[in-house]
Amino acid sequence: MNLKTSLSQLRILAIMEGISYLLFALTMPLKYIFEMGMPNKIVGMAHGVLFIAYVLWVYVVGNDRKWSWKKIGISWIASLLPFATFWIDAKYLKPISEQ
């Protein structure tokens, strides 16, 4: 994967954002059951940065590739659902990058 293209960068961001979202499944019990808040703060900060980067990069790539607002909106909504950014990568981003 060539990381020099905005599409490849978006694919990496989508995967990293999805992983950071899923890491909350590990850090939430640490915070609320074992009263260890620091892992959740670290994952929360990383997730916040990745979320903002993903949302911005979806707009950049969507604008460059003339995506419809529906496709951009679906990609944005995917950032709010667990596993959905992985689906976006498989459904929209990977097929485009293989062309």
Image: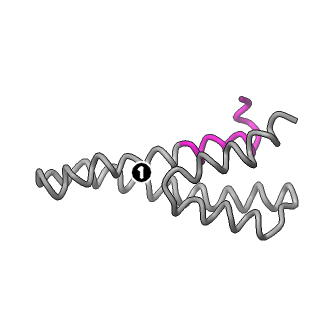
Residue reaching furthest left? Answer: 34
The amino acid pointed to by label 1 is Ala
Query: Quadrant of the rendered structure where residue 44 is?
Result: bottom left
The image shows residue 58 at horizontal and vertical percentages of 69, 58
Check disc 1 and report its element: helix, strand or loop: helix
Image location of residue 34, percent across then percent down: 11, 50
- The kind of secondary structure the magenta stretch mainly shows is helix
In reply to whether residue 86 is colored magenta, the answer given is no
Q: Is residue 13 left or right of residue 45?
A: right
User: What range of the chain is rendered magenta?
Assistant: 1-15
Left or right: 77 as drawn, with respect to 27: right
Residue tagged by mark 1? Answer: 46
Left or right, 86 with reference to 31: right
Residue plotted at (84% across, 56% down) = 64
* 11 inside magenta stretch: yes
Residue drawn at the location 74% of the way across and 58% of the way down: 60
Residue 86 at what x, y percent from top left? 59, 45
Quadrant, the C terminus: top right
Vertical placement of residue 70 versus 82, above or below: below
In-front residue for pair 87/14: 87
Q: Quadrant of the N terminus?
A: top right
Residue positioned 44% across, 52% down in the render = 21
Identify which residue is drawn at 31% across, 50% down: 42
Colour treatment of the image = one colour
